[in-house]
Image: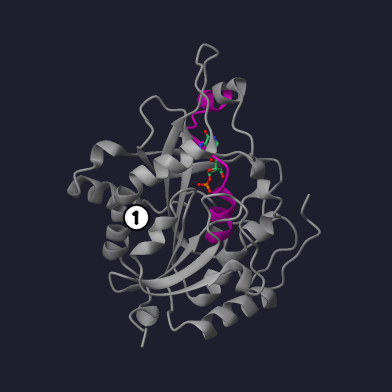
Amino acid sequence: MHSKEQISHDEYQKTSDWLMSHTKHRPIVAIICGSGLGMLADTLKCQDSFDYSDIPGFPQSTVQGHAGRLVFGELKGKSCVCMQGRFHMYEGHSLLKTTFPIRVFKLMGVETLIVTNAAGSLADGLRPGDIMIIKDHINFPGLVGLNPLCGPNDEKFGPRFPAMSGCYDKGLRSLVMELAKQMGVSSLVQEGVYAMVGGPNFETIAEAKLLHRLGVDAVGMSTAPEVVVATHCGLRVFGLSLITNKVVKSYEDSESVNHEGVLEVGRLRSQTVQQLVTELISRMEINNNENTNNVS
Ligand SMILES: O=P(O)(O)O[C@@H]1C[C@H](O)[C@@H](CO)O1
């Protein structure tokens, strides 16, 4: 268990201060790129980018398809920060480390978090290449106590017992459905429930059948801890899964999933995902204007 590890408020603050003193951007939106989706950062204008290895306190990415770079820039007049590479529990990071950037973003003034991931589909109506707007999640590690919020609660970030109903913002979900219609890609986009499993192995057939019976639409190995920490500290969250494969759930099926295939679907659908996220950022309302358009 991870209950002994603690990261003090000061440590988050030091990383935030370091970043704020190395860039003039003051982001209001943070984006986490899933496997094969690092190109989301390419759309940012006037970029300042930092390798994770150069940022004090930051963990390191070890997974192919996760570059390990934090990119600041502007998108449609809004200041953003983008993680090209996230941290997964299966890499050996504690859950506090996997979610470290979220609290740093909060301290930097970020209001909205956009999480993306690659996921396998269990729902028959979700095909590889489809985009699932995350309506809700099942955090399997969290259900058995592997939760970044375990341990002493830091009230400066949020309450001991945060509510998680409604953690994927309804207004942003409707907006993206509407944008998908306007872009002519609504046949690719639908809402669904994401489940996080620990990984790094993909699911057995019996596990896949179980997830399917539980009503899971797509399964992956990330995102839920990030969303828990973001919700705890009051960030508005939007999430999407790029469906990269069908999860094998029949003993008759000879197909199997692999990480290269996951990355390949990311590359094939990159433009559509990029356009949806760009339009979302362009059209989303923000609460606090102080952080916008302030790159001198
Ligand atoms: O970072 P995400 O959740 O997009 O990565 C998924 C889950 C595993 O890390 C990897 C499997 O191919 O892709």
**Which residue is rendered at x = 32% and y = 63% of the image?**
281
58 left or right of 223 in image: right
Residue depicted at x 63% and y 54%: 62
The disc labelled 1 sits on which kind of residue?
Leu
In the rendered structure, the answer to whether residue 183 lies left or right of residue 227 reads left
Image spot of residue 166 (x, y percent): 45, 50
> Is disc 1's CB within 8 Å of ligand 1?
no
Work out which residue is located at the far bottom of the displayed protein and give it: 296
In the rendered view, tell whether residue 97 sits above or below residue 157.
Answer: above
Does any portion of residue 225 appear in the rendered image?
A: yes
Residue where numbered disc 1 is placed: 172
Residue 278 position, x and y percent, is 30, 60
Q: Quadrant of residue 18?
A: bottom right
Can you say whether 248 is above or below 109 in the image?
A: above
In the picture, which quadrant includes the C terminus?
bottom left
Determine which quarter of the picture holds residue 172: bottom left
For the residue pair 4 and 52, the one nearer the viewer reads as: 52
Q: Which residue is at a point 53% across and 39% down the rendered structure image?
A: 259
Q: Which residues are magenta?
A: 210-230
Q: Is residue 228 magenta?
A: yes
Looking at the picture, tell me which residue is in the foreground, 283 or 67: 67
Q: Residue furthest right?
A: 4
Secondary structure state at the residue bearing disc 1:
helix
Give yes or no for residue 123 being in the magenta stretch. no
Percent position of residue 218, x then y? 47, 35
Residue 60 image offset from top left, x and y in percent: 64, 61
Is residue 158 visible in this depiction of the protein? no
Residue at 58 percent of width and 59 percent of height: 229
Judge the density around disc 1: few (<14), some (14-19), many (≥20) Cα neighbours within 10 Å.
many
- Ligand 1, what quadrant? top right
Q: How many marks?
A: 1
Tell me: 237 left or right of 225: left
